[in-house]
Amino acid sequence: MTPGLPRDFIRAQDVLDGRLAPAETRRLEQQYGNEELLYGLDLIGVGGPFSRVTPWELEDERGRRRINASGYAATPFGEMPPVLTEFLHGYLDHNRAMGLAQQSSSPWRAALEANLVRLLARELPSHEDSQVFFCSSGTEAIEGAMKFAKAWRPRARAFISFSSGYHGKTYGALSLTPNPEYQDIFRPLVPGALTSPYGDLQALRDLIRRLGPDKVIAVVVEPIQGEGGVNIPPPGFLSGLGELCRQHGIVVIADEIQTGLGRTGHWFESAAQGLDPDIVTLAKPLGGGMTAVGATIVRGPIYKKMLGGLSSKRHSNTFGGGALAMAVGLKSLEYLVENDFPARSLELGKQGLAHLQEVQRRFPRLLETVRGQGLLMAMQFQPVVGLPLPGALKELAHEATAILALRELHNAGVMANLSLSSKRTVRLTPALDMPGDVFTEMLDRVERFAQFNPSSRYLLTNTPPQLLARLAAFAASKPKKRTPSDG
């Protein structure tokens, strides 16, 4: 047999040189990948592939350009930011440190561990003795946090999370994500995962009392819910939660995967709202949009309880802490700190929210409400069908509202994010370093989108009938259980 690649093997250089055509890319994705997802995205014209024009602007195969406010907060500096690509050239040329230092020290890992703990301790001095466990995603960071908490309170059995929350889709994280569409087929989930209403401190107090405080391992909370539609808790909720758990020795896990490191205008949104959690999980912005980095920051005694002595391999991650990921994370954190991007996010976010509020005031039949903190913003739309609908039809109509809004925003030149735990909501998560003129243009395009769709029914009437028919057929093929309505 003659060595070499098979004739149908796709070479890396072909992809790098752009020789894999967009149509062929879509065909291969739908044949070998997540066919239904890519088909659905392709139906509404947002499936790409897209190419980078600038870090903040993308182009489709027809040359149409759009400002990218999508990426689910995982692209803090846009696509292929020069600050990271230039650094990576130097890393690849000059790094001599071991790539996967699983059983030895690593200078890259050591530097990022130290910087993260020092940054957290600057906001929350009680974390001066904290330690870091690295992984490759946010859901893995949550899984690690659950194990650290359980090791600390081995006799307890319950985790409490909150309605409309999102913590990931691996088994433990999924158990804390009360979305029937994500959970139902996978039941039974991790035992003892319970849900309390978000923002209701008295309900949490009552639940802990019913269970018995000694039976609760941890309370897991997003300081602001992202997937839930940018839900901001009432003043005092997080600080009260912290005090309640502290009274009973219950571990508090702050899921800062979307809110942490500047997106909301603060380094750590939990600290800004008066919460001093025992465990903090980070991910999305830490990878700079270039690689996957997750981190679980844990108070020293809790960390050592699980990973002390000969039990130090009780939890591990093959690729967590790899030199390339740590190098990108280190440079990303450096760029965030040097430029004080939380302060910039706070200022731009005020401008952005004020603009969106004015659009909502002018077009109340399109937008029911807008919400935001820093550069985490949401638009909740009026339902495309105003008549009362029963159960599943109501949920489908709500889901269609956001999908059609996403399509119309795309046509107006803005790429946004769905919020599947809040079906009539679309999020904007622009890059933290997006230039001011680009940010203003993005908001102007949202306004033009509203002018073209002055009420939500225009989201239907501006969609070609044949496309609506195909979308209806696609929706009919989905599982019948739906996420409870957001209203």
Image (tube, rainbow, N blue to C red):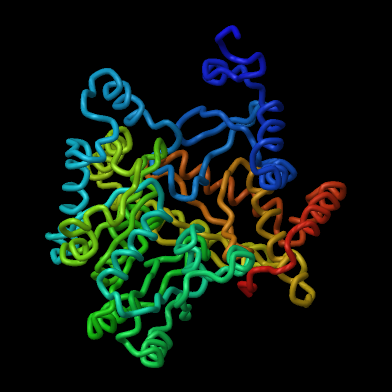
Q: Is residue 334 visible?
A: yes
What is the count of numbered marks?
Answer: 0
In the drawing, does residue 440 fall left or right of residue 86? Answer: right
Point 50% across, 56% down: residue: 355
Quadrant position of residue 152: bottom left
Query: In this orientation, which residue lies closer to the viewer: 402 or 27?
Result: 27
Q: Which quadrant is the N terminus positioned in?
A: top right
Point 56% across, 28% down: residue: 51
Quadrant position of residue 255: bottom left
Name above or below for residue 475 compared with residue 291: below
Image coords of residue 384 (percent x, y): 74, 64
Point 52% across, 46% down: residue: 70
Query: In this orientation, which residue lies closer to the viewer: 243 or 269?
Result: 243
Image coords of residue 275 (percent x, y): 27, 71
Q: Which quadrant is the C terminus positioned in?
A: bottom right
In the drawing, does residue 481 fall left or right of residue 210? Answer: right
Point 82% across, 47% down: residue: 467
Image coords of residue 312 (percent x, y): 22, 54
Image coords of residue 229 (percent x, y): 52, 64
Quadrant position of residue 154: bottom left
